Each structure stands twice: as C-alpha cells, then as structure tokens.
Amino acid sequence: MNDKIEYDNQIVRMFVICILLWGVVAMLMGIIVAFQMIFPSWNFHPWLSFGRLRPIHTNGIIFGFTGSAIFATIYYSVPRLLKTPLWSSSMARVHFWLYNLTIVLAALSLMAGYTQSKEYAELEWPIDILVVVWWLLLAINFFMTMKNRTEKHIYVAVWFFVATIITVAVLYLVNNLAIPVGLTKSYSIYSGVVDANIHWWYGHNAVAFFLTTPLLAMMYYYLPKHTRLPIFSHRISIVHFWSLIFIYIWAGPHHLLYSPTPNWLQTVGMLFSLMLIAPSWGGMLNGFLTLTQAKEKIKTDATLKFILVSLTFYGMSTLEGPIMAIREVNSLSHFTDWTIAHVHAGGLGWVHGICAAAVYYLVPRLWNTNLHSEKLAETHFWVSTVGILLYVVSMWVSGVAEGLMWRAVDASGSLQYPSWVEIVNELFPYRLVRALGGVLFLSGFVIMVVNIIKTTKTAGSGFNPVDLREGSKA
Ligand code: HEM
Ligand code: HEM
C-alpha cells in the first residue's frame, strides 16, 4: 500500500453503519413475514400485511443490506487496488445520501401499497429515476478512479465490480421502462410474454450481478487481504470471471418453465443454467483452495469460518439452482418452499457470510482498534449457522412435501389433497421452525452489531492484526 495516498475512510464507515442498520431492519421484516405465514391474524393492518412487508424484506435485504456491503467494499478496496485516491469524495457522499433516501422512500411507498408488481423491481418510476441518478454517480466515480490509477494490473475483484456496475445499469434501465400515468402509477412498456421475459431476464440477473458478482469481488478481496496469502489461482479467477458473466445472462428463462414462453427459450435457460455449474464451482474452488493455505487458523478465526461456510453454501446453491432449472425437477420445486430454501441457502449462507467477513475485516481497520471480542464473533458465527440450517433444512422438507402433496393422486386418479388449505396446514411445523431459525439468525446478527458498537468505543487505540499464515504464531 502506498502511504502517500490518502484514502477516504469516512465514506466506508458510513456504508458499514448502513450494513448493520439495514441488515437488522430487513431481517426483522423477514421474521415478521415468516410468522405471518403461520399466524394469518398477524396481518392486522394493510400497511403491515404480508403482501406489503414481503417486498420490503426482499428489497431491504438485497438493495439495503447487501448493497451497503458492496458500496463499502467498492469505496474501500478499489482505490487501494488501483493505488489512487477515490476520484470524488463529495460525489460518494451524494451517492450515500440519495441511496439512503431511496431506501426510506421505498419502504414507505411499499407499505402504502404502491408497486409496479415486478419482483425485485417493485418501486414506482420516481424512485427508479432516483436509483438511476445515484447509480450513475457511483459509476462515474468508479470509472474515473480507474482512469487515474497508478497500478497497471487490474485485479479480478475490480473486474467483478466493473461487470456489476455496467450490467446492473443495463438491466435496471431496460426492465423498468414504463409509461407513468401519475406520480405513483405506471405501466410497463412491454406486454404479456415479452414483459415476463424481460422481467425474469432482470430478476435472474439481479441475483447474478447483485448477489453474486460483487460478492465474488468481496471474496477475492477480503480472503487474501485477511490471510495475507495470495489467491490460489489468478488464471482460474480470470477464466471463471469471463465464463460466469457470459453464461449467467442467458439463464433467466429458467424462471418461466412451463409458461407461455417459447419452448426453445425455456430450453436455452435450462441449458445455460446447467453450464453455470462450471464457472460457479471454479470460483468456489479457488476460494476453498486459497483457504486451505490457512486451514489451521480457521479453527480460531471467525472471519475465516464465515468465508468457509459462505463458500460451502455458494457451492450448494449453485449446484441446486441448475438442478432446479431442469424442467422435470422444476415441475416439483416451482411455487414451493423448495425455492425459498434455495434462495436462503444463497442469501443467509453465501451473501450474509461474505458480508459478515467484510464487516469483521473493515471495522478494526476503519476505526483503528482491535475487535472488541473475537469470542462474540465466534458466537455470532455459531448462532447464525444453526439459524441457517434450521431455516434451509425446514424449507427443503416443506418444499418437497408441498410439491409431492400437490401432485398426489389416489387410486381413482383424483387429487389426494384437493384442499389447498389442508396442505398449508401440513406445512405449519416446518414454517414454524423456519421462523425460529430466522429469529436465531437475527440474534446472531445483533451480537455482531453489539460487538461492532463496543469496538468503535475504543476507536483510535491501535489495530494489531493477527498473522494468519500457516507456521506463524496465532
Ligand atoms: C448456478 C447458479 C444458479 C442457478 C442456475 C439458479 C437457478 C434457480 C432456479 C431454477 C430457480 C427457481 C426458479 C423458479 O422455479 O421460479 C431459482 C430461484 C432463485 N434463486 Fe437461484 N440459482 C443459482 C444460484 C443462486 C444464488 C447463488 C442465489 C443467491 C445468492 C440465488 C437466488 C435465487 C433467488 C432469489 C430465487 C427466487 C427467484 C424468485 O422466484 O423470486 N440463486 N434459482
Ligand atoms: C432473519 C432472516 C430471514 C428471514 C426470517 C427471512 C424470511 C423470508 C420469508 C418468510 C420470505 C417469504 C417466503 C415466501 O413468500 O414463501 C422471504 C423471501 C425472500 N428472502 Fe428472506 N429471510 C431472511 C433473510 C434473508 C436474506 C439474508 C436474504 C438475502 C440476502 C433473503 C432474501 C430473500 C428473497 C430474495 C426472498 C424472495 C424469494 C422468492 O420470491 O422466491 N432473506 N424471506
């Protein structure tokens, strides 16, 4: 690191606080909707009903919690990797405030019932325009910082951020094209099957370019920085980067199997999904093989444990996803809790794991002090891991049971469970376990928040990182 360069740590600190704040809010929403699914009486007011709180959970966790972790990492790592100060600190601050304004407006408008009715793109057009403005500010700042770089080599983490910034802009603009008929209502410019295809091209790639590529960038940054070891293979990182971004963009139609979407397009979606196993596992293995260089230290280091579990869930969900994209499997999994298990293996396991590692890496460095308690970080790890397992396993069982009950027929060929409510009642215990798993998971997260608040109380007292390389003293 070049000592002469002054890095803007304040903007990173601001986004780190948002990771914690929006994380707690969005997970709390997840818990409320989980309980509303088993206790319908919890839907006591339209503003607080399942249909309105669910998109607050999904938008809050994806764009609020994960988004804050992505932006904190971009503003921290990119200037350091490219050995140049951030191009504009004031632009980053405008980005920060407009971004947070968006989150507040999003929550209020969704609670009031205003929605475009497109999943992960529910926000109405005035808020969409706000998003475009701050995304553009981020993009300009990012690319100008790249232009001013004094480091010739562009590390793979920066490549992943480039892909994120460009692709999300294209997806967001195309999917949200709409004709406003008032301040709070608009109609998509697409209709019917075209609308559905554009929507799931966006929806699937929101997963790819918001919950995967920037998280891979974070893995490629924090893992070697934290262990002070090189990544296992730069060659694999480049090969899997190009193949991942090329293949991902075609897989969207797997969300529309057995729909009026043309059959050939569904097959394209299915085949590209299967092909995605290779680059996804390339990235996972590169992470695992980097971790093995510090395997003894995993026992004592919570950050490494989070990365280990995170990569494990990344591997699992990127194997499960392609399997679910096979038509015959999808005919069982679609519309059931199996999809929810898959989503949360990715969300709670992969996404949260890398974000937690980011927080534990950044906070001591940004506040120049040691982490208040490594033991609390360890407790966070175990509590949240048990929470994830309760969540994901209960949803797998519930999902498969649900799918099988829907299609079960008796000897006469009639449906064995003609009443949908009967099936919902059968799923009660699994959904209760899921909700309790969520409570445990959030408890783990709150332990991290307390640990971080206590850490910031000793700001400036000096940070002495532990040497995690094999053979070094722990
Ligand atoms: C190789 C990678 C992956 C493939 C091929 C894949 C495939 C799939 C499939 C087939 C579905 C079910 C679609 C349906 O029946 O409607 C699905 C749903 C979903 N997946 Fe994945 N998945 C992958 C990785 C991931 C990861 C890593 C995450 C999270 C970080 C994730 C998040 C989601 C979400 C949020 C949904 C639900 C979408 C919705 O209906 O709202 N996926 N995925
Ligand atoms: C305390 C933790 C959490 C709880 C209790 C929780 C709970 C829920 C519930 C109950 C649903 C609605 C399920 C349904 O409609 O059947 C849901 C949906 C969803 N959650 Fe979570 N969640 C949590 C954390 C997360 C995290 C960390 C992520 C991602 C980073 C995430 C991403 C999503 C997504 C994308 C959906 C929509 C899935 C779909 O439409 O198929 N959640 N969550």
Image (spheres, helix red, strand yellow):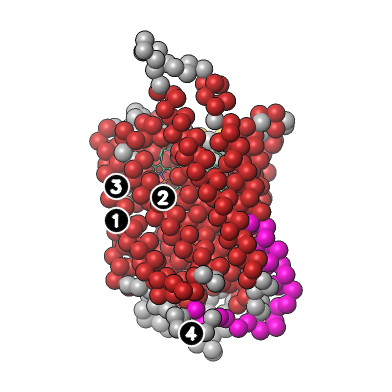
Coordinates of residue 377 in the picture (x, y in percent): 62, 66
User: In the figure, 38 relative to 347: above or below?
Assistant: above
Image quarter where ligand 2 lies = top right
Q: Which residue is mark 4?
A: 472
Q: Is mark 2 within 8 Å of ligand 1?
A: yes
Q: Earlier in the sequence, mark 2 or mark 3?
A: 3
Q: Is mark 3 within 8 Å of ligand 1?
A: yes
User: In the figure, 138 relative to 393: above or below?
Assistant: below
For the residue marked with disc 1, what is the amino acid?
Answer: Ala
Viewer-closest of 444 and 382: 382
Q: CA distance from mark 2 to mark 3?
A: 12 Å
Q: Residue 274 has which mark?
A: 3
Q: Which residue is mark 2?
A: 317
Q: Which residue is mark 1?
A: 278
Viewer-closest of 308 and 355: 308
Residue in the picture at 36% in, 31% down:
331
Q: CA distance from mark 3 to mark 1?
A: 8 Å
Residue 57 quadrant: top right
Coordinates of residue 424 in the picture (x, y in percent): 55, 26
The single residue placed furthest to the right in the displayed view is 457
**Dots 2, 1 in contact, CB < 8 A:** no
**Dots 1, 4 in contact, CB < 8 A:** no
Q: Earlier in the sequence, mark 2 or mark 1?
A: 1
Residue in the picture at 70% in, 28% down:
41
Residue in the picture at 63% in, 43% down:
436
Q: Point out the stretch of residues depicted in magenta.
A: 444-468
For the residue marked with disc 2, what is the amino acid?
Answer: Ser
Q: CA distance from mark 4 to mark 3?
A: 42 Å
Crowding at dot 1, Cα within 10 Å, few <14 / some 14-19 / many 20+, comes out as: some
Q: Of discs 4 and 3, which sits in the foreground?
A: 4
Residue in the picture at 47% in, 51% down:
346
For the residue marked with disc 4, what is the amino acid?
Answer: Ser
